[in-house]
Image (cartoon, rainbow, N blue to C red):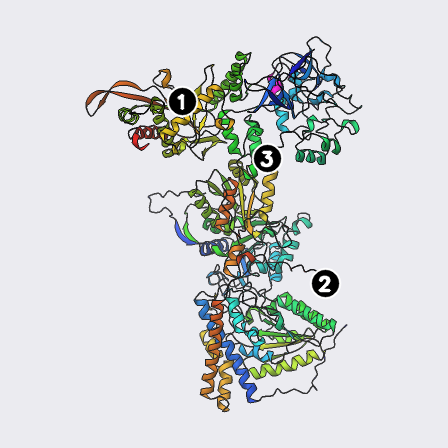
Amino acid sequence: MTEFTMPSLGADMDEGVLQEWLVGPGDRVHKGDVVAVVETDKAAIEVECFESGTVARLLVRPGTRVPVGAPLAVIEGEGASGARAGARGEPTTTGAEAVSPMVAASVKRPRSQNPPMRAKADRERAARDERPKPRRKAAGEPKSVPEIRSEPRKEPAHTAAGPIPPQPGVSAETDSALGTGPLVRHLALQRGVDLMTLHGTGRGGRITRADVEHAQPGPVPRVRATPYARRLAHDLDVDLTELRGTGDGGAVRAADVHAAVCTRAVRHQPGRPTAHQRDDERTQVAVAGDTRPEQRTDTMRRAIADLMSRSKREIPHYYLSTTIDLAGAVDWLRRLNRGRPPTDRLVPAALLLKAAAVAAREVPALNGFWQNGGFVPGAAINLGVAVSLRQGGLLAPVIDRADALSPEALMARLKDLVQRARRGRLRGSELSGATLTVTNLGDQGVESVFGVIHPPQVAMVGFGAVVERPWATGGMLGVRPVVTATLAADHRATDGAVGARYLTAVDQLLQKPEEL
Amino acid sequence: MTATHTRTSTPTAPSDRKTTYREAMREALREALGTDERVFLMGEDVGRYGGCFGVSLGLLEEFGPERIRDAPLSESAFVGAGIGAALAGMRPIVEIMTVNFSLLALDQILNNAATLLHMSGGQLPVPIVIRMTTGAGRQLAAQHSHSLEGWYAHIPGLRVLAPATLTDARYMLAPALADPDPVLIFEHGSLYNASGELPADAGPVDIDHAAVRRAGTDVSLITYGGSLPKALAAADDLAGGGISAEVVDLRTLRPLDDATIGGSVARTHRAVVVDEGWRTGSLAAEISARLTEQHFYDLDAPVERVCSAEVPIPYARRLEEAALPQVHGIVAAARRTVGDPVPASGADETKRQPVNREGGPR
Amino acid sequence: MSTTRTRCASRPATRPNRQAAHRMALLKSMLRVRRFEERCVEMYSAARIRGFMHLYIGEEAVAVGVNEALTADDAVVSTYREHGHALARGVPAEAIMAEMFGKVTGCSRGRGGSMHLFDVGRRFYGGNAIVGGGLPLAAGLALADRMTGQGRVTCCFFGDGAFAEGEFHETANLAALWGLPLLLVCENNLYAMGTALARHQAQTDLALRAAGYGMVSWAVDGMDVFAVEDAARRAAEGVRAGTGPHFLEMRTYRFRAHSMYDSDRYRDKAEIEQWKERDPVEGLARRLREAKELTDKARSVLEDRLAAEIDGAVAAAEQAAEEPVEDLLKYVTSPVEASPP
């Protein structure tokens, strides 16, 4: 019998809002399962429990602000006679937990009760996972939630009874929520109430209009999104609630989803596998003094692994490389930096980035996305810059409209992004929208890097270290600083000639640094 | 569908011919009359006059008054007579001068032509072709500016065609005549003088399928007939702003080619339907409904419709222009779908909810 | 209710007063139509007038003569070749010209154009561009007069082409059956657009066929304004007297093509020239000159006055405003007005 408490998700966090329960009383949970969503000042974060057992009671209503350390739920440990999910009078056709995964995979629920995407997710999960994962339930909520005092307590105050036993013939899973009429659903939508969190007082536990009217509006109203964006978000594992819509009335459009995909700034829909958690959250969490960094980075690794595997599985890469004479650029930089304090000095990397962005203007076929069997050009040149993290893993924060920034502005932006990426202080919006990504491993001392394309982008530009090499020019041999620029590009979208044009453009731009 | 015709160097090879829509139609009639003696042309002023719009010029001299029959101003009678002749095994092509006069024959078209096969339990197919001029834009005012093809497309039992290109004008008639059921061909009055090259290798038109006249990735402009040139011009305009528009020419308004229309929208995720009919209950409304039925999860924006304003077409030039779909309105609608709206002008007929004085959409 | 066809042979023919002034008024009225139509050709050629336009040149005697038989209370329903009818009815030249210029000062606010002139104040129920489309409408106006006991006449103009339409036959039967106060004036100009009468009517004696419906009907020389006026007065009197619809076949001719859009290749030039010798306007002018009722000076004064009037109409039409595009959706449904308490 343990308490599940509000976790600390950052050194500066002293309270959080419990946004959503992903489990309900009676659910079996395993160590590491995601059981709730907590909103911090930065983002909504899925939190996991560190115990296996059965959820006995939920103590906090969604939407409640709770200090760190306060109990959120009571979990009966392994071996305790926790009621099995199936013992709650559910028909066995309600989901994965009460039946074996193989059976669950073939269970079809009526459409009206289970939107196809959910059903699919359940089936996929059931097919993928050895053990069932908790699913969102119509939680039989406590009638009264104990008042939370400011000081954390070991034992929660006495709480009311758990779930009401279901009426005969009506499963608690009748999804009191899903079994409601359109009027109630519409009302809930209007008021931003999550039906899943309501306790129905109607016949057979049905949620009535009054239940909705008396409910606390949830913090997340329904996301306004186009049907295609919804479908895409589902297919690409993007959480719509994370996105800022650019469409009519703030609607999330496909472009917004694609932008989010570029960074995999993904938080899972409730009840979905935890394999690809939001990279940036991971980062934040990873540097927040978490007690299990290895587990955090492990999750991030898996996210990267998934994405890179998909890239290599789906994208036929072709690779080009060229070595660029930087003598002129280095001279120009030296003159420019003369008399500047070290902090204000421009480094070659800024010129390389700028050249990469401007060249994309000249060869737009490499700037954009491959989707639905066709190339969709990016609306602007938003450069993703790969940043490796000290504890492993990487992020690709985005410099919007990089081609329009001066090298100085680019460099300032880059510095700021790298610093904050490594401190886990990036905003979600800074991780989305890249139309082309650059990786620069020069500081690691390698001469060239052939990147793996970040789907759904169609190219990845790589720069190695600026090194001095013997160089022949005009029949004379000299020593010059050179850099190897590479391109990995999607052969579905372009052919080698286009890639060659791009690298040539980068070269030519770097020959005139003063014009960059 | 702009098949680039590669010319061979042999001198005998056919080459593209310069022609007009009007001549292409005439050529099609000539071919039909020349190859099948059951075919005859009947209508007002089709013979000595050469057709109100000059389509049948010279055919009387070539085929004689038996097969190029001038009819009195009696639409109900001569359309009905065409239906009767078709029942008896002929292949009549009946010309109704303009779509407004077809209203005088609507009863015959709806209650006989479209219905006899069914009423007779399959005994009486009606292989008739009825041609008429449709559309507005030439300041002909309210009684000569209708676009009623959408009405006819509402009627089961009919096939409704709208040739918008020279090739379609030239090669749609043969498959229409081959159809065992009634076929209506709507020729937009603004197209007759359109001229261009008729590809030498063009053959009979596939009247079961719509044509993609221009490929694009961002938005599908779905249209037909006299609005096709406007949609293509809008696509050019949009391309200038970096928006790649696909232009789908329906060609056949009934039965609609869902596969081509839907396939395009599945690629572009956005649709603007351009239809000169009045907005309410228009063919555009049908297409919009089908898109939401069949491609809801492909849509990244509401389906836009650019239709005629809900007003009898006025005579005054500026009012008429404002009442009809125009290039700028198509561009504005397309830009709205891709989330790049243009500030709307005061009298933009493409507002999503045209509101009348009573304050509701009609 | 059946109507027995009684031709009132005993009816005293009311001879119109052929005072010189009246004869001059007829000339002036016809000449006004002629000059107006000529100016329309000019304006159309200059693209000031658009759309379809059908000219009345050659048929002026019909509109002007028939109008003499009508009072301000009577109604007129017309066709798409109606400039002459509208002018004769008293619709100002300026309002007609402005209409064709698409201006808000036009008699239909620029919404109708050449084929749709309306002036309800003058009970002019418009040009109808659907062949035969005005006939049932006229029957309805007459029906209303019958039902409300108004002693009014509804006069409907239509052409020989419309005689082939079902609308004519259905209306003729209905009007005769119910004895409606309807004056049917068929302007038989021998061509339905490009199709000669004999090629679209099996029986070309239209008056004979109309009589078959049980209407009093006769044919008139439509190039002689006096003949037209006489016939129209007699017919209108018969209608007013409650003897049911009357039918007049006006045998006339248009000197110009069917419309501005028509190349007129279906008529013999010689035939046109032959009919021009029977020009109703110049014919009357010649008779008046011979009768010493019209001097050259008077003629030129008349011409100057008409030219000034039409110049003024054109100038006013040019000056007039167009209806703002914001008003596009007006006049689709009637404005809802609060009912008085």
Are the residues under marks 1 and 3 on the same chain? yes
The extreme top residue here reads: A79
The relative height of residue A199 versus residue C331 in the rendered view (above or below) is above
Relative horizontal placement of residue B68, taking residue A345 as reference (left or right): right
Specify which label sits upstream in the sequence, 1 or 3. Answer: 3
**Label 2 sits on residue:** C340
Which segment did they paint magenta? A124-138
The amino acid pointed to by label 1 is: Thr
Q: Which residue is label 1 attached to? A: A439
2 or 3: mark nearer the eye: 2
Residue found at the far front of this picture = A150
Name the residue beneath numbered marker 3. Answer: A224
Badge 3 density bin: few <14, some 14–19, many ≥20, Cα 10 Å: some
Magenta stretch, main secondary structure class: loop
State the SS at label 1: strand
The amino acid on which the numbered mark 2 sits, given as a three-letter code, is: Pro
Residue A5: where, in percent of width, then height? 64, 16
For the residues labelled 1 and 2, the Cα–Cα distance comes to 79 Å
Amino acid under label 3?
Arg
| Of the two numbered discs 1 and 2 in the rendering, the one whose residue sits closer to the viewer | 2
Above or below B227: residue C73:
below
